[in-house]
Amino acid sequence: MKTTKLNLFAKGLASFALILSFALVGCNSDPDMPNGDEITDTQQVFVLNSGGNGKANASLDVYFPASKKQAFGVFRAANNIGLGDTAQSIQVRGDGIWICVNSSQVIYHIDAKTHKILGQIKDISKPRHIYFVSDTKAYVSHFEDPNITIINPKTYQKIGTIETFMTKLPAGTPADNFSTEMFVEVPGGKVLVNCWSYQESVLLIDTATDKVEKTIKVGMQPNSMAMDKNGLVWVICGGMTWADPEMTPSIYTIDPKEDYKAAKFGDVPEIEGLLYQDVKNLVMNRDGESFLFSNNSHIYKMSITDKVIPSEPFIMIPRDHFAYTLAIAPNGEIYVGDAIDYRQEGTIIRYSADGKSRLDQFYTGVIPAGFAFYDSKM
Amino acid sequence: MRSILTVVLTLLCIHAIAEERDSIAVAQRYALPELSVTSYRPLSQIGVMKSELDTLVLRDNIALSLGDVLTYGSGIFVKEQGRGALSTVSFRGTSASHTQVSWNSIPLNSPTLGFTDFSMIPSYFVDDAMLLHGSSSISESSGGLGGAVILATDLRRLPEGNKFTFVQGVGSYSTFDEFLKYTFRSEKWRSSTRFVASLGRNNFYFINNEKWELEYDDKGNISRQYHPREQNRNASYRDFHLLQELEYQPSPNHTWRLVAWGTHSWRQLPLLAVIFSNDRKLINDNTSNSIRAALSHRFQGADWTLESKLAHSTNRVAYDNGSEIPSLGRTSYTYRTRSLLHHTFLEERLKWFASPKWLIDASLKAGLQQAYTSDLQKLNLDDGTYGASLSNHRVEASAYLSAKYSPSDRLGIAPAIRLDLYGKKIAPIIPAIYLDYLLYKPANIYLKASVSRNYHHPTLNDLYYFPGGNPDLRPEQGFSYDIGATFDYATPDWKLGGGVNWFDSHIKDWIIWLPASGTTSIWTPLNLHKVHAYGVEANLQGAYRFNELTQVDFQTNFAWTPSINKGPQLHPRDQSVGKQLVYVPKISLSAIARITHDTWRMTYKLAHYSKRYTLTSNQVTPAGVVSPYYMSDISIEKLIKLRPIDLSVKLAVKNLFNHKYQTVIGYPMPGTNFELFITIEY
């Protein structure tokens, strides 16, 4: 058969396609990675980014308030591994930082200056928060585990468990009931821990015996709590308006001086026009005279002497912003974390202590979920 | 090895194309396809942008799901987390729910989630697979903003009498694949029974570079650290499929057909590599039992056909996610979701050849979708019973009408409209128009174009899931146009065909889920984004026969699919506007080359995806980008004649070059692995 121009064109095209396909086989490449700046400020704000659940993109950033500079992804930069999946809490202890990574089921202890791992506690069910009883004993709260785990922070070993009333719930009880959350130290070598998910209890634990002494009933889903200067513990109960409109968010108090008697202070005023109410993030001011909390998008401030829960925001968060997390720095400045669409870098707004001035705004990792304040000079 | 193979294959191809032969006699041991093209475009195909998957691609080996077939046999992006795990597709840069999938006209898209899990479709349960790109999918259904995947079985090709086929596959990671097929054909009856069983542990080893194993000295300081060698955990699967088809043709005009496909699937969902749970058993399982059945009647008149179909599918899905609490000896669950989904519909389809130049294509479909979902972890606080997350049904109806007209041999024009009713709402009319023009007859070069509007209705979860469902959602609206060209050319000893196509889609009211009113615990779907998806699709395939025993085939697919979020900004500091959608690669490439000689056949397959962003901001961070990769598989098969049975032995090597890669961040994929297949036909 005679070769035509069409034949030649078609064959050339076929050859090109095949050569291109096979030539590409060996050409793998890695994406470019960002570089950080060298920063020498001593005051540092650690921003813990939880990352999306199941996305394995938790991270740790550092913000330097004096220079307004940042270092991104310091955990990975120091350790050459990611922080894991769904980081939950961060706290400074001495020159170390402890990070609970919920879904990865690990607790990291890192050096606050170098960010290098000093130790890790593996295979610990969905850790939420740590309370240090001493240098050799600490409690770890959990999601979906009714017990509280006792660890030795020096050896990074699990050394025991504290059973709670949830431990004794009958088989088949929904696991959402099994959770403990934040610790608040109270006088007499005791500590309170709230049972957040689908529960309405706060537990009193004796740190000498490692036993639950008392189960204190509060409102539905106590999510955050703190002690004021008079020793009264304030508890925000988020409610469950999505399940029952009558389960509204509320504030309770627990008085250690009155045998840990709980009292409902009141329901948190509803913001009109919202699908559901979301009240959380109770943080006490350093003087113990007032506290902040978030109600959906906005920040509210309440004095411990107030008779009613405020209905006007202390900080009106700009339109389209959302207060996902909240913290008060040692100097009183306020940090509000916003997750935007939960699938990109979040943003932090830093306010002055009086809430009137916006001092800075900066990006962080995905879903900023917690803050820790550290001064390397101290 | 890679270089040698590349050179050999390339030289073989060039040699094949350079050499000329006047003619060949067909006497293959393997049934090599005819090297010819049909220089005739039926009226029904006017302006249609479609790709048909080669039978040899579908039948490459029994271990392949349709997701695997699409990975290597199309330009569609397939997102999967390994064998036996969820496999979804992105067609033309749209989301998985924007690809409509049907098997023997039964929709496979989940009515609650919207997408199709392609890993649940055994490739051996599909005889014909066709991709309808963009506007072309409107002839089958609405909602295919990216396109449609049309799958079907076909009993017309059955050989006379009885035939048994058995395939056994044994592979790495305790993988076992079984396929059994019995067919029967007489003058009036055709029957096909197929059974597929796939089992595997998927427990490959890998070095976990996202963990450190630490050893401490007496003072509690780290004395040694290393990345542990770990085994992929919680990735076992057991899938069983049974398909029965029966066809009765009492006269040439009437054909009755019954198909029924039952599935039982139990799958563990792989764990993230960053989970540190060593001792406790983690549970992340999905169990699915489904039945899909259809009874149809087809009347073939002199110039018209009428097909009536009554179909039903039921799917019962259980998802458990939790972990054991050793101290209690019990399991704590996060989710224990139970879903029961029903879909029943009746469809009539008429094709009337009003004249040699006119074809009227019309269909009418009415159905009922029902979904019940509950979570055993959600107590109903009023009465202590378990709470229902979803308990809804939706009546759906759709009417389609198209007039296909060919005023000359070269020109075709086909306007079409579709009207949908879902629930109590009537969607706006979906109009479309298709054109084609035969530019150069010797090479069958056609110019094709189409333009259409399309709507994708919210899923039942979008509308009614409790808590968070949004009954006020609007359908996602798409406006698309395509323009392209195809060609086919053949001589007795070689053929070449292909096409290139530009597409442009503007989608508004794109649905995304966000926390409701700034809450963090309850998410709700909203009509928020506009998306501009555009790009180029191209394909090229060909074959060359050296002689009566030897043939080379190849096919390549390429897609360039920018898919851009056009806003609006959700937040003043939202960085996602103007960025590529997450997990949508801009470039997808696949290629298959096959050499057949006498009783031997070697197949090489290549798939490439460019980097995929995991963050809507497209920030390039270690967890923000899935690295691009090139994946190569190869197989060698030998046919052995042992009358009265035919036997073939095949060795498949996957991930030939042992690339470390991930398709979803945090989930490692296996290195080089093997599977041996034995096929017995009687």
Image: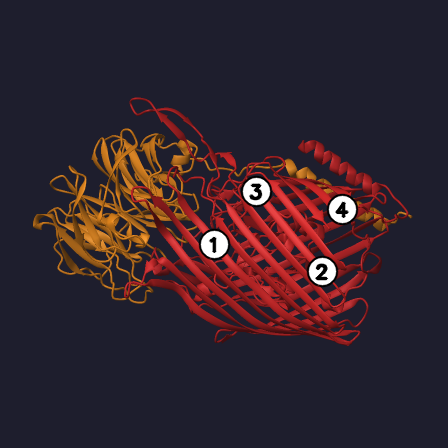
Chain colours: A orange, B red
Q: Earlier in the sequence, mark 2 or mark 4?
A: 2
Measure the C-alpha gap from mark 2 to mark 4.
Answer: 31 Å
Measure the C-alpha gap from mark 2 to mark 3.
Answer: 30 Å
Question: Could you say whether the residue bearing mark 3 is in a helix, strand or loop?
Answer: strand
Q: For the residue carrying disc 3, how many other residues have a C-alpha within 10 Å: few (<14), some (14-19), or many (20+)?
A: many
> Which residue lies under the disc numbered 1?
B287
Of all chains, the one bearing label 2 is B
> Which residue lies under the disc numbered 4?
B553
At label 2, which amino acid type do we have?
Phe
Residue under disc 1 on the same chain as residue under disc 4: yes
> Which residue lies under the disc numbered 2?
B184
Of all chains, the one bearing label 4 is B
Measure the C-alpha gap from mark 1 to mark 4.
Answer: 40 Å
Given residues A185 and B344, the one toward you in this image is: B344
Q: Earlier in the sequence, mark 1 or mark 3?
A: 3
Measure the C-alpha gap from mark 1 to mark 3.
Answer: 19 Å
Q: Marks 2 and 4: CB-CB under 8 Å? A: no
**Which image quarter: residue B217?**
top left
Given residues B210 and A59, the one toward you in this image is: B210
Q: Earlier in the sequence, mark 1 or mark 2?
A: 2
Q: For the residue carrying disc 1, how many other residues have a C-alpha within 10 Å: few (<14), some (14-19), or many (20+)?
A: some
At label 1, which amino acid type do we have?
Thr
Residue A115, given in percent of the width and then of the height, sits at: 35, 32
